[in-house]
């Protein structure tokens, strides 16, 4: 069964919604690496306090994709 024009428009809207996340993937990855490589727990906590967006659930899908790309 072929997709209807409405189905295709809905899929395009979903893909367009992902575009900002994909554009930020490198920035998110860099921030995660910087956080993970902090040498102490105190520095790790301080990094998260200054970068609260790392804990934003909007990034979960991007992080999952980055981790699965290995």
Image (cartoon, helix red, strand yellow):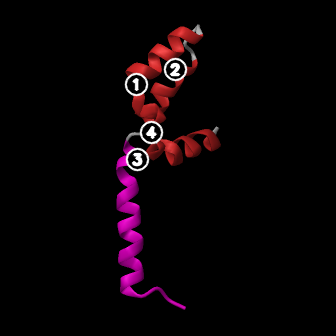
- Residue 21 is tagged as 3
- Considering only vertical position in the picture, is 16 above or below 61? below
Q: Main secondary structure of the magenta part?
A: helix
Q: CA distance from mark 1 to mark 2?
A: 9 Å
Q: CA distance from mark 1 to mark 3?
A: 17 Å
Magenta-span inclusion, residue 3: yes
The N terminus lies in quadrant: bottom right
Residue 37's spot in the image, x, y percent?
57, 15
Q: Which residues are magenta?
A: 1-23
Magenta-span inclusion, residue 7: yes
Under circle 3, the secondary element is helix
The C terminus lies in quadrant: top right
Query: Which of the two labelled residues, at mark 3 and mark 2, occupies the earlier sequence position?
Result: 3
- Residue 34 is tagged as none
Q: Residue at x 37, y 53 (%)?
A: 19
Q: Are marks 1 and 2 in contact (CB under 8 Å)?
A: yes
Query: Which of the two labelled residues, at mark 1 and mark 3, occupies the earlier sequence position?
Result: 3
Under circle 4, the secondary element is loop
Q: Left of 70 or right of it: where is 26?
A: left
Query: Which of the two labelled residues, at mark 3 and mark 4, occupies the earlier sequence position?
Result: 3
Query: Which of the two labelled residues, at mark 1 and mark 2, occupies the earlier sequence position?
Result: 2
State the residue position of label 1: 51
Q: CA distance from mark 3 to mark 4?
A: 12 Å
Mark 1 is surrounded, within 10 Å at the Cα level, by few (under 14), some (14 to 19) or many (20 or more) other residues, namely some
State the residue position of label 2: 35
Residue 60's spot in the image, x, y percent?
52, 44
């Amino acid at each position: 069964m072929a997709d209807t024009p409405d189905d295709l428009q809905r899929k395009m809207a979903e893909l367009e919604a992902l575009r900002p996340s994909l554009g930020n993937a490198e920035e998110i990855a860099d921030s995660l690496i910087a956080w993970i490589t902090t040498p102490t727990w105190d520095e790790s906590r301080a990094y998260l306090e200054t970068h609260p967006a790392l804990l934003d659930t909007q990034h979960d899908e991007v992080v999952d994709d980055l981790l699965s790309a290995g």
